[in-house]
Structures are given as structure tokens and as C-alpha cells.
């Protein structure tokens, strides 16, 4: 039997995140305010060759709109770059009903619920790994993973049964874990781009490598 790939809308496995979402349901009843599901291409999960793993929904981004990286700055850079490399088509307009469609790519988060101050704690990352692991297993034609930031990287390594010490995060690096190649990048957050930790060119060059790998 396939493990559950998405938490229920009212998932209470992480009490702090459940309570945080409950408070935002009161404040902003029109928002999505629930675990954000994996974004899939219209061709379905068997077409997925690349999985992108982010950290967690942004409060006014994915938590508001219900689609990963949609509605905050991180998505502007990510979706522009995906379109540039032929991994998405259409127009990204930061709304889940825009015409943006993924190609051979799916996008998920290491933690599916919005965390206070954008910072999930260790137990939440560990608990939500159940869903990350189930997501990794659902894509039978998966070849590559791109992890965005250290937390996503470490949780992905663990979900794949690897040891973090043996597979450390390094921006621009890639490593083989089992049959999959795991690429890593600094997270494309506004903070990282504002501070210069990640430039657009650095992000693009990670995607250049991924595109070369997928085109081989
Ligand atoms: N939005 C997401 O869905 N994930 C992130 O990691 C950041 C913004």
C-alpha cells in the first residue's frame, strides 16, 4: 500500500504548527491555511524526473495561496528560472490559478505547514519527514532532487536513508544517494538574495547543471 503522501487538512501531528495555522484561520479565513500539497505537473507523477524540496510554506506565500513558492519573493526567482530551463511553461503570476505548469518537475517542502518566523523546529522536521519520504517514493521515474537550503537538504538525505555526515550540504554540489542524484542550493529566499549569499547567477548555474544532467 502507498504511504500517505499528504497530511490531512487538519493534521495535528505538530501541535505548534497546528495551533499557528488555527490562529491564522481566525485572522485570515480566506487564506489556504493548511498543509500545502506537493505541486505536480499536469502529466502526472510518472512524468516527474526532478523533485525540488523547499523548506516550508511562507506565511503570506504558499500558506496564503496553497501552492508551494507562490505569493512570496522566493517563488519569483524559482519559477522564472524553471521557465528559463524548460522545466515549467506558461506565465507565473503568483496565483495558483495562473497558467504556470511544471514540466517533468514537482515541488514540495520538507515541512508542509507554515512555521512561526519561518523556522520549523527539529521535531517538526522529523515528523513531517514521513510525508517527504512518501513523496520520494511516489515518483518512480525520479532521477534528480534539488534541495533548497540546509534543512531541506538534511531532511532529504535522511528520507533517502543516507547519513548527513556522509552527504553534507554544499551550495552548487551534487551527490549520488542510492539511484538518485541530489543537487543542493542555498534557499532562494529574499533574505539570501538581499544579503548576497545567493545571486541570481549562482542559482541559474545550479539549474544549468541540473538541465545538463537531465538532458544527458
Ligand atoms: N515557499 C515555499 O513553499 N517553500 C519555501 O521553502 C519558501 C517559500
Image (cartoon, rainbow, N blue to C red):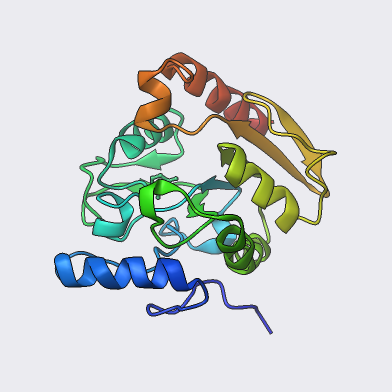
Instruction: State left or right for residue 96 relative to residue 157.
Output: left
Vertical position of residue 169 compared to residue 57: above or below = above
**To which quarter of the image does residue 188 belong?**
top left
Residue drawn at (78%, 43%) of the image: 164
Query: Which residue appears farthest toward the bottom when viewing the image?
Result: 1
In the foreground, 72 or 205 = 72
| Picture quadrant of residue 206 | top right
| Res 68 visible | no
Task: Name the foreground residue: 141 vs 146.
Answer: 146
Q: Quadrant of the C terminus?
A: top right
Image coordinates of residue 92 in percent, x first then y, are 26, 41
Q: Is residue 138 above or below residue 69?
A: below
- Quarter the N terminus occupies: bottom right
Q: Please state the horizontal and vertical placement of residue 6, each as a whole percent of the image.
A: 50, 72
Image coordinates for residue 110, horizontal then vertical, percent: 55, 54
Residue 166 appears in the rendering: yes
Q: How many marks?
A: 0
What residue sits 46% from the left and 46% below the top? 103
Relative horizontal placement of residue 54, taking residue 75 as reference (left or right): right
Vertical position of residue 121 compared to residue 16: above or below: above
Give the residue at x 23% y 45%: 94
Q: Is residue 25 above or below residue 182?
A: below
Residue drawn at (83%, 47%) of the image: 163
Location of residue 4 in the rendering, given as x and y in whole percent from the top left corner = 58, 78
Question: Taking 152 as reference, is 203 left or right?
Answer: left
Amino acid at each position: 500500500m502507498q504511504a500517505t503522501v499528504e497530511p490531512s487538512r487538519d493534521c495535528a501531528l505538530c501541535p505548534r504548527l497546528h495551533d499557528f495555522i488555527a490562529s491564522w484561520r481566525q485572522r485570515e479565513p480566506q487564506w489556504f491555511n493548511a498543509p500545502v500539497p506537493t505541486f505536480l505537473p499536469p502529466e502526472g507523477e510518472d512524468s516527474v524526473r526532478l523533485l525540488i524540496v523547499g523548506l516550508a510554506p511562507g506565511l503570506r506565500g504558499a500558506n496564503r495561496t496553497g501552492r508551494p513558492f507562490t505569493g512570496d519573493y522566493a517563488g519569483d526567482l524559482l519559477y522564472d528560472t524553471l521557465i528559463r530551463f524548460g522545466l515549467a511553461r506558461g506565465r507565473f503570476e503568483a496565483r495558483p490559478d495562473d497558467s504556470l505548469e511544471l514540466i517533468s518537475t514537482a515541488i514540495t517542502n520538507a515541512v508542509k505547514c507554515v512555521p512561526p518566523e519561518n523556522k520549523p523546529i527539529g521535531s517538526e522536521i522529523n515528523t513531517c519527514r514521513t510525508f517527504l519520504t512518501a513523496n520520494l517514493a511516489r515518483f518512480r521515474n525520479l532521477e534528480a532532487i534539488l534541495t533548497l537550503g540546509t534543512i531541506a537538504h538534511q531532511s532529504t538525505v535522511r528520507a533517502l536513508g543516507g547519513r548527513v555526515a556522509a552527504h553534507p550540504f554544499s551550495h552548487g554540489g551534487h551527490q549520488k544517494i542510492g539511484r538518485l542524484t541530489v543537487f543542493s542550493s542555498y534557499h532562494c529566499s529574499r533574505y539570501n538574495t538581499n544579503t548576497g549569499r545567493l545571486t541570481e547567477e549562482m542559482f541559474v548555474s545550479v539549474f544549468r547543471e541540473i538541465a545538463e544532467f537531465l538532458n544527458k
